[in-house]
Image: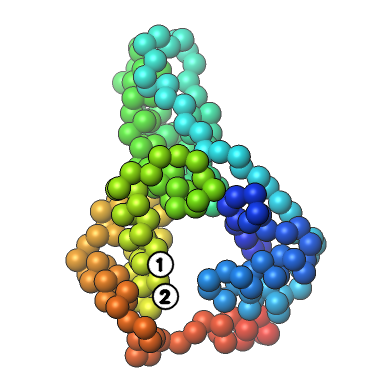
Amino acid sequence: MGRGAGIGVGPDHAPPVDSEGYLAFAGRLPAPELHALLSRAEPLGPPKRMRLPTSLRRRYERLTRLPEGFIAVADAVCSFNPAYGQGMTVAAAEAIVLRDCLRRGRRDLPRRFFAAAAKVVDVPWDMAVGADLRHPAVVGPRSGRTRFLNGYVARLHAAAARHPVVGRRFLSVANLMTPPSGLFAPGIVARVLWSGRRTTPAPGHRSLVPQVEELVAR
């Protein structure tokens, strides 16, 4: 038994909530593996829809006056687009920050905690918000840096289909196990640039669709 998630951005791109429509939605995705899996699997129930209108970050560390004895953590500090799977990891990291702050006593705890927690949130927030801005329906300023990073990551995704080491590095960064600079290691950049020049599959590259269908048939 497993669960699948389809994600759409914008008013005209929300995944349908009927089984046939959801399957058709999966068939329009760039990678065919999910459609292959869903077309052979038996649904346990109809699709469910969850909407997230916006990502939200509260900058408590910028307040000049904070009430003693009260702190906010997790989504009360920052709520991410759940598509990136970073919220619980950031909440756990904030718990570690709180532990370290408490070890130094409770004096001025809110100010110290929010200042340290902001540094934890900075990287995943930049990653999530920047990635959201690749969708035209998302409102927000797009700097040259944002456009460059989104263009690079799009090519990195294509390279990951050919080079497992690129895919593993991307997942490591996305799951906050490796800093974003890891995506620009020489070996990763070389594979991204080389894959962008190729129009045919690399030697030994095989589509995953037959493997997915074989797995479902077992």
Q: Quadrant of the N terminus?
A: bottom right
Tell whether 127 sits left or right of 27: left
* 130 or 13: nearer the viewer: 13
* 35 or 145: nearer the viewer: 145
Up the image or down, 174 lies above or below 80; here it is below
Q: Secondary structure beneath disc 2?
A: loop
Q: Secondary structure beneath disc 1?
A: helix
Which residue is located at x 79 percent, y 62 percent?
Answer: 18
Task: State the residue position of label 1.
Answer: 157
Contact? badges 2 and 1 (CB < 8 Å): yes
Task: State the residue position of label 2.
Answer: 161
Q: Position of residue 171 (x, y in %)?
A: 41, 61
Which residue is located at x 58 percent, y 52 percent?
Answer: 9
Q: Is residue 205 visible?
A: yes
Count the marks.
Answer: 2
Residue 97 appears in which quarter of the rendering? top left
Q: Position of residue 105 (x, y in %)?
A: 35, 17
Q: Quadrant of the C terminus?
A: bottom right
Residue 90: assigned label: none
